Image (tube, rainbow, N blue to C red):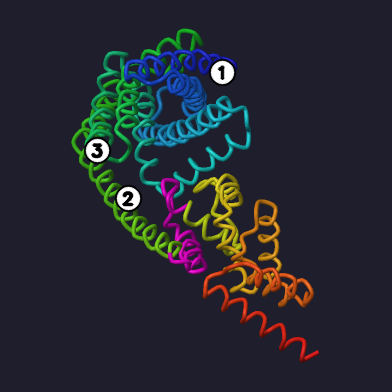
Amino acid sequence: MRRSLLRALLSGVAGSMVCAGIGCAMGFDWRSVGNVAFQGFLGGAVLGAVALFESVAWPRGTPTRRRLLATCAAVWVLASLLCLAALVESLYARGFLESFDSDAARERTARVLHQIHSEPRLFAGVFAALGLPFALGALARGCALRVPEQIVVSALGAIPPGAALLLGTRLAPPTDSRFCFAIVVAATVLLPLAAWLGDLVEQRSWGSAAPRRERQRLLAWSTALSLLMLGAPAAYGFGATAVRAREEKRVALQTLTTQVRELVAFGHYARAVALCVEAQANDALDSDAWQLGWSWAEASWYTGEPPPPSWLCDAADSYRIFDGDAFMREGRVRIRLEEGDFQGALADCEYLEAVGFPPELLGPRASAHLALGQVEAAEADLRAAERVELSEDLEAEVAEVRARLEAARRAE
């Protein structure tokens, strides 16, 4: 256990240097270089976990073919999941270091996690490609191959599927795809060397049984050639299918965004919110739909419905903007009157009164007071409205409220 932890530490330092070097070569800014370097350091946990896993899986002697293949598959899954965890953790750390705000860092991480949930094929493909060199390295080591032969086997098995998936399809943004492919190429070369150095540091051997070199070499090479001939087409087909599904979802999302924005423009806020909630229930949203998020936030602000989720739109900022816009407040007064939210309409009127109450809202405020049984306040608003010059429509509105007021008094 201590030696595996030492290997994890040393490989983490080496991984940080490799990732930072690749980031510098690709022209990343200093924050991005620090981010990928941190990913590489956390990726050292992958090598430490794999070393510990091998110690448990191969307790003595040369492992059998079945155990080798089982270990290879398990290492593949383990390495893919740990690489994903390293990405999420590094994004949280970067978000925290940029603002020293844990809430902002959690919000950014939540957006990434929702992106993983909404596009599982993308992340499954990318991190499966990143975990494949670890799996092939474990297989080659278990087959007792020498380091140069391990590099060739890993390169034949990992690089063609990685190129087909990451470079042959638009599964991920171009910069991310090139970076991940560079990591795959570097891993096929450096992981066998790192494992060999780790064995020297740990002074570790796999037992005293004589390795069945010919049989195990055939297994390693047949696996690599199978991945070369079958893995690359399968990876390309997987990526192309995922890209096509994502494009279809994006077109549907663009159509939904257009519908919601039109509904908001014409004042049909309740219908707009209903469409957004339905799309969220059907898992048709992702964190890139920021335009829909703002329209959703505006519609929910008008109707008083819950805001959109934080991973889609920063509802707190949008609500502050909406709250400080007097024109939007004026519009919400009438909407709340139509929906029967008279207390909410008066609350907006109180805000507008503090910043300069428009005479056009004297009639709506009188209507809200009257609906709540505040007859004297309604009378005061109507008298004030009759002393100012209003358009014909607004004068008719004031006259209609006056008629309702008189009818209420006669009913008393």
Q: Secondary structure at mark 1?
A: helix
Image side of residue 339 versus residue 81, left or right: right
Q: Residues within 10 Å of mark 1 (few under 14, many from 20)?
A: some
First in sequence: mark 1 or mark 2? 1
Q: Which residue is mark 2?
A: 246
First in sequence: mark 2 or mark 3? 3
Q: Relative to residue 227, is residue 301 depicted above or below?
A: below
Image side of residue 346 versus residue 257, left or right: right
Tell me how far mark 3 sits from mark 1, CA to CA.
33 Å
For the point 37% across and 14% down, the residue is 21
Instruction: Specify the quadrant that holds the N terminus.
Output: top right
Q: Which residue is mark 1?
A: 5
For the point 63% across and 71% down, the residue is 364
First in sequence: mark 3 or mark 1? 1
Which labelled disc corresponds to residue 231? 3
What amino acid does circle 3 point to? Gly
What amino acid does circle 1 point to? Leu
Instruction: Give the residues drawn in magenta, as a range.
Output: 266-293
Q: Residues within 10 Å of mark 2 (few under 14, many from 20)?
A: some
